[in-house]
Each structure stands twice: as C-alpha cells, then as structure tokens.
Amino acid sequence: MSEQGETGEPITILLVEDDAPTCWRLQDALVKAGYDVRSAGTLGEARQALNSGAPRVLLTDLRLPDGHGVELIRETRQRCPDTEIMVISALGDEESVISAITVGATGYLLKDAFPTDIATTVRDLVAGHSPISASIARFIVRRTQGAAQSSAEPPPGPALNTARLTPREIDILWGIAKGFSYAEIASHLGLSKQTVPGHIKNIYRKLEVHTRSEAVFEAVQQGLIKL
Amino acid sequence: MSEIAAKATIRPRRRLIVSRLVPYLLLQALIVIATILGLRLLQPSDPEDFALSGFSLREDGAARAVTLPHFTSSRYSLADPPLYTGAFTYRPADAASGWSVFLPRFSNAVEVAVNGVVVLDSRRDANANRPDRNTPQIALIPASLLRDGSNEITVQLFVWGPLKGFLDTVYVGPDAALRPAFETRTLLFVTLPVVFSAWQSILAVILAIMWLMRRREPVYGVLAAAMVLGVMQAFVPPPVPPATTSRLAAVLLASAPTESALIVVFALLFFGWRWPRYGALLFVPGIVVFAVGLLGGPPLPRILFLVLGIPMVGICLLLMASITATEVVRRQDAASFTIGCAVTIVLTCWVHDMLSVFEIVTNERTFVSRLSYSAMLVAIGAGLTWRFARALNQVDSFAGQLVTRVREAEERLKASFAREEQRARAAALANERTRLMRDLHDGLGGQLVSIVALSERGHEGATITDAARAALKDLRLVIDSMDDIGGDLMLALGSWRERAAMQLRPHDIALDWRVTTPQGLPLHPELRPWHVIQIVRILDEAVTNAVKHAQARNITVTIDTLDDGQAPYGVISIADDGKGFALAGEGTSQTARGIRNMRSRAAHCGAVFELSSDSSGTRVRLQLPQVFPDSDAAAG
C-alpha cells in the first residue's frame, strides 16, 4: 500500500524530531503506510531538507536542539505555501499546539499515537481535514468568551486573536470541546458531516498570524523566541 | 465636711465674679465717658457768624420775642402753626455764591419764607420729616428776593405730637459759608444712617440664608428678622399729616420695641440661655403698638411709641447689658465683651436722647440712639460672620483630619485585606497542590515505578507499553483537569471521550456516546480541578475494567440531566456488554480494589456511585451532586 498524491507520486513527508526513538517510531508508522519520509533531527537539517525540495507534509517537534519549531513552521509557510504542517507534541497541550497554529500549522500529532492513527491523521490532513482535539477546541472557545467579556487581564496561555471566527465556527468548536462527534455536530447545526473538517481548517487559517513582524511579535510574547 | 466644701467652692466663685465683673464695669464706665465725649466732639459746628437767634414768635394769636433754639408745645393739628419772624441784613458784597438759609435741626417740619416768598418747605422731603433723624435743610434764596439791608424771614414750624416742636438756630448767609456745615450734618445724619441700613439689609439677607440652611440655629433667623424690621423702619417714608392713608407705614415706623425685643431674644439664643418663662412678655409692647396703631391710625402709633416703645427699648437695652455682663463673667470671651461694650454705647446714647427729650440737659435735640443701634447691629453681624467663618475653618480642619483618618484606615484595611487574600490564595494553592501531588503519587508515580520494575525484570513489549501509556494518559488527565473549564463538566468529558476512544480503538471496542440534553450537564461554578480528576478517574476505571476483565465489545456512555425539583443534577452511566463479574468474594482482586477506589472517589466529591454487574454486562451509575463539596473532609 502506497499513499500517493494527485500526480501518482508518493506523498513526501519531512519529519523533524530530535528524539531518535520517537523519530523512528513515527517514521516506521508513516513508511509502513506508504509515505516517502525524510527525517531531520535539528532545525539546520530541516532547512537543508527544505532547500532540496518542498515536502507535501511537514511534521515537526517544537523543541529542537538548535532552535524552535515555530520558526521552521513560519519559514515553511512562507516558502512552501502548499505544504501541510502539523506539530508533533507529547501531550497535545494548548501551549505548544496553539503557538504552532498561530504561525501556520493546521493540526497536531501525539507522539504516542497508535501507528494506524498516525497514518490516518496524515492522510486526513492531506485530504484537507485538519484534526482538532477537545482540549484545543476548548481553549479556543474559552478565549472567544474571554474576548467577549473584554476582561482587563489577558487570560493565561499563548496569545490568540479569535475575532475573525464566525458564530458557526465557534458553535462547531463548542461541540468538539464537549465531546460531540462531527456527525453529531453536523446534525445539531444543520450541516453536512463532510463540511465540518473543512470548517476546522478554516478556523486554523483564521487563527494564523499573517505578517512576519506579527509572527515574531507573537513568538516573543510567548517567550518562544529570545531576542 | 460637705458644708465646708460648699463654702469653699462658693467663696472662690464669688471672688471670681468680683474679679471679673469689676474690671468689666470699670471698662463700661470708661466707655460711657468716651461715648459722651465722642458725642460732644461729634456735634457739628455751625457757622455762628451767620446765626439768627432773635425771633418773634406768633402762636395762638399772641406774639412774643423768643431766642432760638426754641421748644414749642406739642400739638396734633397743622392748622395755624407757630410762626417765627426775624430779620437779617443782606450785604451784596458777600453774595458771590448767592445767599442761603440753613436750618440745622427742627421738628417736625418747616416752611421758610424770605420777604413773604416761600423758599423752603421741608415737608416735601421724606427724610426731613423723621423726628428720629436730625435732618438739616438748606435753601438758596433767589437774588431777586433780597434787598440791600434788612430782610424779613419767617419760619412756620409744623408740629405733630407727641413730641414738642423744636427749632434750632437759623443761619442766613453766603452759601459758601453755610454749605460745609450742612454737608457735615447731611453726612452724619442722612447718609450714614442710609449706609448703615444698606449694610444691615445685606446682613439680613446673609443671616436669613444662614438660618434657612441651618434651621437648628434660630439665632441667625431672629437677628435677620430684627434687621429686616430695622431696614423697613429706615426706608418707609413717614406719612406727613394730615395724610392718614398708610397706617401700616405708621406702625412700621413704630417697630423699635419689637426690634429691641428680637435683639434680646438673639442675645439669649446666642449665649445659649434657656428661654425664660415670661419671655413672651418682651413682645407685648411691640404688639400693642402694632395692634393699636393698625386699628386706631395716626397719631396713636406715635403716642404709644413714645409711651410704650421708647421705655421698652430702654428696658431691652438694660436686659442686654445684664445678659452680656453675666456672660462676660461666665465666659470671658471676645464675643460677649464686644457685644457688652456695644450695648453700653447704645444705652448711653439712649439715655442721652431721653435727657434731650425731657430737656433735662441743654441740647440741640440731636438723637443718636438709632445711629448707635445700627452701628451695634453691624458689629453683631460682623461678629456672627466671624464666628461662622471660624466654624467653617474648624469644619475644614475637622474634615481634613477625617479624610486623613479615613485614608489611613482604608490603607490599613487594604493592606490587611491584601494580606488576607494572599493568605487565602496561598492556602488554596497549597490545598490544590496537596491534592494534585496525592493524585500524581497514586497515578503517574505508581505507573512509572511499575515501568521501572518491568524493565529491570527484562520484560518486553506489551506490559511496559501499557504501563507507559497509562502514565501518559494520567499526565494528560492531570494537565487537562487543571484547565479552567468554567464549571462545565462537559468540557472535561469531551477530552476524556477522546482519550477513551484512543484507548479503546486497538481493542476494537466501540464507544457509544449519548448526551440526552443539548446542553449536556448543568453548570457547577464551584467545580474544582480535583473534582474533575476524581470523576474522570472513576470513568477511566470503569472503562479499564470493561476492557481488561469483561471482554466487552461495546461501551455506552450516557450523560443525563435530572431534576428533583430543587436543582438539576447530572447522571453519568457507563454500561458494557461484557460478561460481568461477581461483586462479592474477590475482596483482594484488582477489580475489587478498583471498585473500592471508585466508591471512595465518588464519596470525596459528593457523588452517588452505583455498580451492578451480571452476565449481560456491567453498569456503573454516577449521580453527581447538585453542589460539589468544597472540601473532601466530609467523605472521610
């Protein structure tokens, strides 16, 4: 079985992870599923790999020996707009996932996910379906509430501008946060089940901080980059 | 003993009174002397070179020679007034500025004619008609009337009782020589009273406003009323007989007894005296004058004023003098001293006027009571204003002190509140930390130790993987529970669903998720992270049991909201289609221990835990409390 893009070529994945066993584990799962996987252990290696050609999918850890994954994600977003980007996280905590989303990632992968789940997640991502967890959805919707209450004190956690989300998108996030399946959300909101993942990708895109200075500012704000 | 003590206290008191009263009385005596001297000095000098004092008076048909100043009998009719006829010598050489006739003092009115032509009629001047003001009159004599040498001057004196008629020396001469004397008298006896009255009216307004704003202090109101009466008295034009139209004006002119009674009341209030039992008697003369005057009409008010009013004024002045003297002895303060001295001056002036009326002393019939009284009122008003300003200052400093005190208290309170808050926060944090530590110890710690043990014994594969996964799951649970979910347990269950589904997927167990109400569970603002951890652990244990021991194919999670009429509460049920297990017996098995754990966790957060198991499956029912307990002490 081989995962192929529209051209028939195998889908290329650049996997950036400094912990070797984790890297092997993920690589094994993806290669078994038929993807063409290149791996990098540092930010420098990843940049080299990017120079030799844009991958279809970039999977990256955030804490790398020579830098932060957020920089890589931002660069990739600018240089290779067609590349789908996912962050690899040990815990899937909102701190790392949200900061990746704001620079252009459209999902996250747990490092201990089962091999079948890893392959499925990447396949869905290439098909335009961004994964989202209940806790990430919860973080985003609680942030929209915080913005509505306009409290003087900014809420803890990474900065997030939720102003561009539509009420429908917020409803979808509420549904996910409360553990409803896509089908249940679609029936509650009168949508077709297939459109829900598309909405989620839209949500990610809306949360992205676009300009370079904005991104740097956000990263500095979050302490991800030290000036 | 007590008698001696009483005597001992009386004696110093008496000594004190003497030691205070004697200097005061001596001072008052000095003031009396000073006042008399002052009145003498005040007496304006007239240009004696041009005095005419030899006149022939024709009265009641008989003529006789008189010397001015001259008193005539009191009368109530204006018909056939006393007629003074005299002569003066006109020297055209002195007539550069024209010649005038100057009458410094007369009562009540005069009509002056030179060579048979009237040059002055004082009845047209309202001020000149008042017997209590010493209004002078001057009139230019038209040059065409004057003849070289001897000229005739006649003065008709109009008198309306009860006072006797009076005509002071008449002066005829060059205007330039007479006018300065006239101006001096006008300033003293016309302008000054008007100035005082104006001042008095302004004070009356100020005092009335003070009283309106501070009704508790009628002293201001009383003084304002007295001043208003005085002002009205000063500005009401006196009716000239035979006009009897304005009885009210006549009565108002005779308001002095009421006014002086009000001043006495003011003194009583000002010094904080108790209202005397017969205090109302003070007002009787004034009211009698008013009533009789209104009913009877002129000249009754004037007669009554003389008989009742003027003595009443004197009595009031004496009362004032004794009140202030008492207060001076008692208080020795500036206010009582000032008022006392002012009263003495007025009293002296009043006595002076009485002596003048009764012709006991030779005089020019200059009345000074009214003038000195006005001066006293102004002094009192100024004193009151001073007292008011001082009170304001005191209020200011008091307010300042109060503000400082309040600020200090506020700061202390704020500091103690901040301390208290910090302490409470620290306590809450420590509490939370203890619970979390306990939980990490039970869960994550145990699992990691288990991994270490398995690795050391050379185990491979599934068991270590399971233990590590459980540890990761636990870590995620703890992290997830720490998140602020705003009391919505559904948000925690949403994350749990994901983790449970991930756990079940490799075992091919379907997770059926049923939420019966659209909102899910009721909100619990009191929900704390450790409640969430307990509940999620119970659910985890139930799912783990179903996977490990029951070989279930389907697990159904039902989230329901019920209402017992008081408040809604949630029920979470987990049912599997496994083979079930016997509840009794296996007291030491892992399952039994798990069930004990679930029960105790449920009790910690006030939930009701029910478990039933048979061959068709196991069913766990967790009934959540309506309000989650604040501490887990209740559960033991």
Image: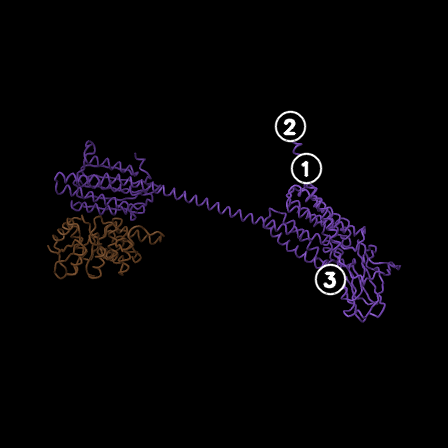
Chain colours: A brown, B purple
At label 2, the amino acid type is Met
* Residue at image mark 2: B1
Q: Where is residue B577 in the image (x, y as percent from the top left)?
A: 18, 41
Q: How crowded is mark 1: few (under 14 residues within 10 Å), some or many (20 or more)?
A: few
Q: Which of B555 and A3 is in front in this view?
A: A3
Marking on residue B263: none
What's the residue type where badge 1 is placed? Answer: Arg
Identify the residue under disc 3: B183
- Residue B534 appears in the picture as rendered: no
- Whether B174 is drawn above or below B192: the answer is below
- Circle 1 residue: B15
Q: Residues within 10 Å of mark 3 (few under 14, many from 20)?
A: some
Residue toward you, A125 or A103: A103
Q: Quick one: label 1 or label 3, which is nearer the N terminus?
A: 1
Q: In which quarter of the image is residue B580?
A: top left
Image quadrant holding the N terminus of chain B, namely top right
Residue A63 showing in the rendered view: yes
Determine whether B574 is above or below A195 in the image. above
Q: Could you tell me which quadrant the C terminus of chain B lies in?
A: top left
For the point 85% across and 67% down, the residue is B150
Amino acid type, residue under disc 3 in the picture? Glu
Q: Where residue B500 sits in the image (x, y, percent)?
A: 21, 45
Image coordinates of residue B94 in percent, x first then y, are 79, 69
Whether callout 2 and callout 3 share a subunit is answered: yes
Task: Report, in whole angstroms, how far the alpha carbon at label 2 lies from the one at label 1.
Answer: 21 Å
A108 displayed left or right of B229: left
